[in-house]
């Protein structure tokens, strides 16, 4: 109660000092506002952009792929004391199944960090229609599980998503290249005389050329037969809850299964690099804008301390303790930060809306409801910290000297 | 009312200086002793004028007595408490409790209203003013003839009015000791006489000890006691008839 009561006086003096220097207060609030608006807008923009890029990239691929280990040459160790010179060629990696993949799948299903687990069999083939030929990637999938990784059904532009019993779903580019429509027949040749003819049940467009021109979705059974891997799967796709944990989780899954686990972070090094540099750039911008805001607050308060030297002296002569003077200026810093960032948050938020409505329309920036409160809290703390040096100066003024200051 | 001023009767000691010295820049070639071993005693209800030529150390003495500056040697007792060993916080507290200041240049806070200026020592003491505080401040403003100016900004009134507000502010805490540093120094003679009359009146009514630095011989002559300071020493201390 005593603390609250004594703070009442600090509030009153701080508010009155700020109100009294109206122009100065207004200018610095606008200054802080511009800084906060930049921070809020750039944070929302980059967050939105990254979410969009990640969504587009990872929306069409698994976060972690579980693959069989590469085959290696086994060399008999040389006998003790003998020196072995080995000349070897690396083994050609044939298509082969993950052994006991059902057990692996069940083990992965039990991992809470994984959102979806989808075994699939994938291998190369030639698609033929009449004299036209195209090289394709056969994707034998469990449609229910696979849809949890890539919701292909949402990207269908024709037909429906049926992959079983002589049906296939292909990409738009491939359909265009081979002049295929719904219900047309397509011959798939996986080599060594293994061929089949499928009906086109659906055509999808993911917007990724590589996928749209190469992927042919079948069910597991048809693909196993075509690729001569009865009952086998070549890869298990998974998605994770926290995509930036993918690398860590992949390492753990590799240890758990004894197989290879490739995270999107390892296979999309450049994307990850781009995202990281972007994040770093944003952080640098935020840091420097934040610093300039802090210096702005500090310099305005430093000037204010000089302007109010005599009044500080009067307050001290009337028995105002040093702590009270200190708190008056810390409060002013906090209030400036709060008011400026409130204004800036509003402007930044408006900029985001303007961008969403009138901008290039490349992507939508979602507005995180916590962004502005967090920005305001940070700005308020920054204001208090920035006020520390001027406030200490004010508190240390010698009242006998200060009161004679003109 | 503070615990420190409570229950004081007339004639009780408010201030006592014992061999008090003030030295500037001690231990350097610029060392200068401006107050030489002063002894002084002031009791409740006294009205004393402190006179002396410029540079005689009047303001320094007033600052030391008002705990704005600390003595270099000797001791200063306020209401019987020795103050030299006190730290800044204790001195600040004591200043708020025991002393009222009136300065030559009024020294109101221009950002605040007249009423808030008068209330400021109480706000510093215990935060939000109580209805009693406000009533007391209004009574004092009424007593100095400025009841109608309570809501005006402090810099919107004349110099004489500001000085009267400063007196009301100095008295709002019912201090045991009122210190005034040339309170009429930059007022015209008529206004000065009016302001000085207030000191005499409050001295009578509240019974606080008043120590006024003044250059005006007519004003000092109207005080019960005149203390003369020359070159940092008290050369005369006499009761006026």
Image (cartoon, coloured by chain):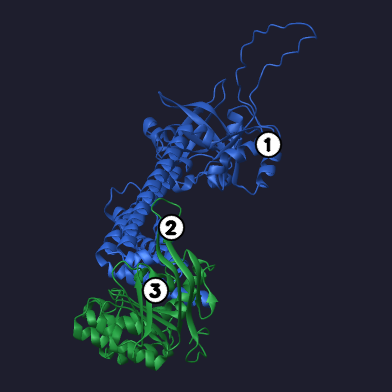
Chain colours: A blue, B green
| Residue B226, x across and y down, in percent | 35, 82
| Identity of the residue drawn at 38% across and 93% down | B204
- To which residue does mark 3 refer? B234
**Chain under numbered label 2:** A
| Residue A105, x across and y down, in percent | 66, 41
Q: Secondary structure at mark 2?
A: helix
Above or below, comparing residue A382 to residue B9 in the picture: above
| Residue B149, x across and y down, in percent | 26, 86
Q: Is residue A157 visible?
A: no
Residue A88 placement, left or right of A386: right
Is the C-beta separation of discs 2 and 3 under 8 Å? no
Above or below, comparing residue A196 to residue A202 in the picture: above
Please identify, in this view, whether the residue under mark 2 or under mark 1 is nearer the observer.
2
- To which residue does mark 1 refer? A101
Report the residue that reaches farthest toward the front.
B235
Which quadrant is the C terminus of chain A positioned in? bottom left
**Chain under numbered label 1:** A
Foreground residue among A26 and A370: A26
Q: Secondary structure at mark 1?
A: helix
- To which residue does mark 2 refer? A388
Residue A386 placement, left or right of B2: left
Foreground residue among A257 and A180: A257
Instruction: Please state the total of marks drawn on the protein image.
Output: 3
State the CA–CA distance, disc 2 to disc 1. Answer: 63 Å
Is the C-beta separation of discs 3 and 1 under 8 Å? no
Residue B232, picture quadrant = bottom left
**Chain under numbered label 3:** B
| Identity of the residue drawn at 28% across and 69% down | B54
């Amino acid at each position: 109660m005593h603390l609250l009561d004594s703070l009442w006086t600090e509030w009153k003096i701080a508010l009155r000092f700020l109100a009294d220097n109206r122009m100065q207060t207004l200018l610095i609030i606008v200054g802080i506002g511009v800084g906060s608006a930049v921070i809020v807008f750039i944070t929302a923009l980059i967050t939105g952009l990254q979410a969009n890029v990640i969504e587009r990239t990872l929306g069409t691929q698994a976060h972690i792929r579980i693959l069989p280990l590469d085959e290696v040459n086994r060399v008999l160790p040389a006998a003790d004391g003998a020196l072995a010179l080995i000349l070897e060629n690396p083994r050609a990696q044939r298509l082969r199944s993950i052994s006991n993949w059902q057990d692996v799948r069940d083990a992965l299903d039990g991992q809470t960090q994984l959102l979806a687990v989808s075994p699939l069999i994938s291998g190369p083939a030639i698609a033929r229609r009449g004299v036209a030929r195209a090289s394709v990637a056969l994707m034998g999938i469990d449609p229910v599980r696979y849809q949890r990784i890539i919701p292909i059904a949402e990207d269908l532009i024709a037909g429906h998503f049926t992959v079983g019993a002589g049906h296939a779903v292909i990409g738009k580019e491939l359909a265009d290249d081979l002049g295929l429509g719904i219900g047309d027949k397509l011959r798939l040749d996986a080599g060594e005389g293994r061929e089949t003819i499928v009906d086109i049940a659906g055509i999808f467009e993911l917007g990724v050329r590589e996928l749209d021109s190469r992927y042919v979705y079948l069910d597991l059974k048809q693909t196993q037969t075509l690729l001569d891997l009865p009952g086998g799967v070549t890869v298990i796709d998974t998605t994770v809850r926290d995509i930036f944990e993918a690398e860590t989780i992949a390492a753990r899954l590799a240890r758990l299964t004894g197989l290879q686990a490739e995270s999107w972070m390892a296979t999309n090094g450049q994307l990850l690099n781009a995202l990281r540099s972007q994040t770093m750039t944003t952080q640098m911008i935020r840091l420097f804008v934040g610093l300039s805001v802090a210096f702005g607050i500090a310099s305005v308060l430093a000037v204010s301390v000089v302007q109010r030297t005599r009044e500080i002296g009067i307050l001290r002569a009337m028995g105002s303790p040093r702590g009270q003077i200190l708190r008056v200026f810390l409060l002013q810093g906090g209030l400036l930060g709060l008011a400026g960032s409130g204004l800036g948050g509003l402007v930044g938020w408006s900029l985001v809306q303007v961008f969403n409505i009138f901008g290039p329309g490349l992507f939508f920036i979602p507005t995180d409801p916590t962004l502005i409160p967090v920005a305001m809290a940070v700005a308020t703390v920054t204001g208090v910290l920035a006020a520390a040096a001027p406030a200490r100066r004010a508190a240390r003024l010698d009242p006998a000297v200060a009161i004679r200051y003109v | 009312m503070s615990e420190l001023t409570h229950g004081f009767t007339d004639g009780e000691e408010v201030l006592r200086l014992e061999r008090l010295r003030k030295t500037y820049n001690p231990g350097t070639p610029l060392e200068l002793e401006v107050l030489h071993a002063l002894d002084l005693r002031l009791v409740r209800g006294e009205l004393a004028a402190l006179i002396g030529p410029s540079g005689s150390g009047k303001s320094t003495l007033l600052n030391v007595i008002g705990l704005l500056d600390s003595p270099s040697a000797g001791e200063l007792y306020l209401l019987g408490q020795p103050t030299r060993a006190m730290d800044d916080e204790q001195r600040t507290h004591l200043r708020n409790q025991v002393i009222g200041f009136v300065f030559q240049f009024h020294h109101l806070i221009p950002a605040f209203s007249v009423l808030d200026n008068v209330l400021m020592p109480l706000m510093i003491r215990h935060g939000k003013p109580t209805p009693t505080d406000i009533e007391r401040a209004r009574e004092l403003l009424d007593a100095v003839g400025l009841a109608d100016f309570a809501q005006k900004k402090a810099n919107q009134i004349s110099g004489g009015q500001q000085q009267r507000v400063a007196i009301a502010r100095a008295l709002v805490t019912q201090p045991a000791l009122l210190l005034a540093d040339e309170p009429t120094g930059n007022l015209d003679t008529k206004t000065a006489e009016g302001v000085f009359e207030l000191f005499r009146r409050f001295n009578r009514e509240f019974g606080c000890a008043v120590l006024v630095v003044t250059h005006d011989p007519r004003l000092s002559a109207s005080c019960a006691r005149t203390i003369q300071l020359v070159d940092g020493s008290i050369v005369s201390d006499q009761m006026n008839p």
